[in-house]
Amino acid sequence: MNRLSLQGIWKQYPGCIANQDIHIDVPQGQIHALLGENGAGKSTLMKIIYGVVKPDAGSFFWEGEEKTVSGPAQARDLGIGMVFQHFSLFETLTVAENISLSLPKDQCKDMTALSQRIREVSTHYGMALDPERYVHTLSVGEQQRVEIVRCLLQNIKLLILDEPTSVLTPQEVSSLFLTLKKLAAEGCSILFISHKLDEVTEICDAATILRNGQVTGTCNPQNVTSTEIARMMVGSDTPLTENYKKAEGNNIVLSIKDLSFKSEDPFSSPIQNLSLDVKSGEIIGIAGVAGNGQDELMRLLSGEELADENTVRILDIDMSQLNPSKRRELGFAFVPEERLGRGAVPDMSLADNTLLTANHRGMIEKGWINFNAVKSYGQNIIDKYNVKCSGLNAQAKSLSGGNLQKFILGREIEQNPKLLICSHPTWGVDIGAAILIRHALIELRDQGAAIVVVSEDIDELYQISDRICAICQGELSPIKNTGDVNIETLGQWMAGQFVDTEVVEGGFQNV
């Protein structure tokens, strides 16, 4: 029996058809992947299923009966739960308090009983949680468990997961997959949204592929290759794989020595005696689970926070106390994790956003803005990086996440920086955009730039990094050539196990 059946779903926005005649069947107990590039219509479809968006046309069938889902509350009553890519948890509340906020009042009168249910359900599905712990003390993987358990306490029949592995270590991914398989075996249907096709082929029983708002194919992922699935997603004219040669750096561009920092924010992670040299012509990849000091390190490098003197140097010039503008004059460029707010001002046009960081590229002469130079620079970014938008006057917030990321990255790269710090360069973007971004980073490296990439995408780091390491609780692991670090070791580093070992006759020895 089909748990969920969508028939002829249409949704149109001004100037855009988000969903066009969508048909999807999800049987009971099936793990069903929903795939597609950014802008393909996945998010709109999920919002329709969860009751956030009302379709213009089409039918919604739930367990054989046609339904109208008027909102998330009604969706939850039917047994539909959703774990969004960005968690909706209150950090200053406990696990039990967070879960209680989404449950009916009669289930929350006795918090002791609720805590016991949380322990039982989380343990049953291999996701043991302490209901009394505060959310800010949990790892990202544990926070995801809270979101899933919150759904499971609501008699869940269909679980929607949006990019569920994007912030997990390899070990946490394996644990999550065991949980999902157990849920499916007990009859729960799962909609799995991901850009990681190897994971889709590993765990999913069926897949529906969207492109430009339409279904372009369906398949059993276990019977086809990742390349075949990708081809259905992006079409036949986009290269799907790139083999990038590893490079050895030359002269030191960025030197970090014994960097320590503790923010006034009680929920931040302190940086502890961190040292790192980055050379021209190399990419260093820093892996890690979110909340382990990545953001603090990025702020110290960008100049949003100031470090102690002589702890951060670029081309042997101390920039520890320099503001962002002064750092850019030295050849520094920065792509932050947060696109809207830090990377671009939402309500400003792309042209105006260009001026924010690239104004020293001949756009201001004697205090006057050279709008021709702004237009030329911005249009080059749009053309070269295939940014889909209505033009330079388009507001930053009107772009999809992937297209805005291409614009921000292009804005920084086209400044020909000596040092580029890039946080999560392809997070949440589609295959085509990810390939373009990675190629641009490699091209910049080959031109002699020093590049640091912070990412939770392990596959990406292995693909583009010349040397690799991990950060955990503000400390940096050993830094090694990427080819010398296997996935198990990197996963251990991400969990804070930095003891380095090598095989010797008779066993292992510490190095």
Image: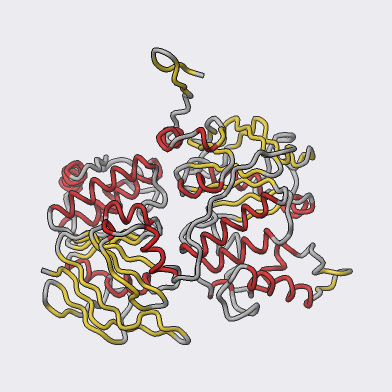
Q: Residue furthest right?
A: 366
| Residue at 29%, 51% in the rendered image | 202
| Residue at 30%, 68% in the rendered image | 208
Most foreground residue, 388 or 44 = 388
Q: Quadrant of the N terminus?
A: bottom left
> What is the x, y in percent for residue 487?
42, 38
Most foreground residue, 287 or 124 = 287
Horizontal side of 77 relative to 134 (left or right) equals: left
Q: Residue furthest top?
A: 506
Q: Is residue 475 above or below residue 330?
A: above
> What is the x, y in percent for residue 20?
34, 82
Q: Is residue 190 above or below residue 288?
A: below
> What is the x, y in percent for residue 215?
33, 76
Is residue 88 something that shows in the picture? Answer: no
| Quadrant of the rendered image containing residue 194 | bottom left
Horizontal side of 150 relative to 324 (left or right) equals: left
| Residue at 14%, 70% in the rendered image | 2
> What is the x, y in percent for residue 255?
70, 36
| Quadrant of the rendered image containing residue 67 | bottom left
Q: Is residue 388 above or below residue 319?
A: below
Most foreground residue, 74 or 196 = 196
Q: Is residue 196 above or below residue 138?
A: below
| Quadrant of the rendered image containing residue 310 | top right
